[in-house]
Amino acid sequence: MSKKHLVKDPVCGRRMSKNKAFITIQHRGEQYYLCCPKCQSEFEKAPEKYIQHQK
C-alpha cells in the first residue's frame, strides 16, 4: 500500500489505511482517524492538543 493512502492517528501517531481506523471523528470540518478506544477517548478530551501536533 502506498504511503499516500495512509492516515495518521493524531494521538499515538500510528499510520493505517482509512478503512482500518477504529473510528473517524470530524472536528472543525476535518476528519481524524483514530486506531482504538483509548486514542478516541484522549482525542475527545482535548482535540486541540492533538491537532496542534498534526500541523
Image (cartoon, rainbow, N blue to C red):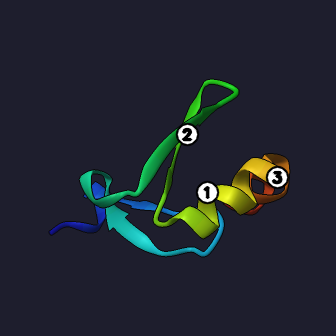
Foreground pick, 51 / 19? 19
Judging by the rendered image, the residue that carries numbered circle 1 is 40
- Residue at the outermost top position: 29
Between marks 1 and 3, how big is the CA–CA gap?
A: 9 Å
Position in image of residue 48 (x %, y %) = 83, 48
Q: Amino acid at mark 3?
A: Lys
Judging by the rendered image, the residue that carries numbered circle 2 is 25
Foreground pick, 16 / 4? 16
Q: Amino acid at mark 2?
A: Ile
Say which residue appears at 66% left-offset and 67% top-offset: 11
Q: Secondary structure at mark 1?
A: helix
**Mark 1 near mark 2, Cβ–Cβ under 8 Å?**
yes
Position in image of residue 28 (x %, y %) = 70, 27
Which quadrant is the N terminus positioned in?
A: bottom left
Between marks 1 and 2, how big is the CA–CA gap?
A: 8 Å
Other-residue count near label 3 (Cα within 10 Å), few / some / many at <14 / 14–19 / ≥20: few
Q: How many marks do you count on the picture?
A: 3
Position in image of residue 19 (x %, y %) = 25, 52
Q: Amino acid at mark 1?
A: Gln
Asked if residue 34 can be seen in this view, the reply is yes
Which quadrant is the C terminus positioned in?
A: bottom right
Q: Secondary structure at mark 2?
A: strand
**Mark 1 near mark 3, Cβ–Cβ under 8 Å?**
no
Say which residue appears at 29% left-offset and 67% top-offset: 3
Q: Is residue 28 above or below residue 11?
A: above
Foreground pick, 43 / 38? 38
Judging by the rendered image, the residue that carries numbered circle 3 is 45
Label located before the other in sequence (1 or 2) = 2
Residue 55 in the figure: left or right of residue 14: right
Other-residue count near label 2 (Cα within 10 Å), few / some / many at <14 / 14–19 / ≥20: some
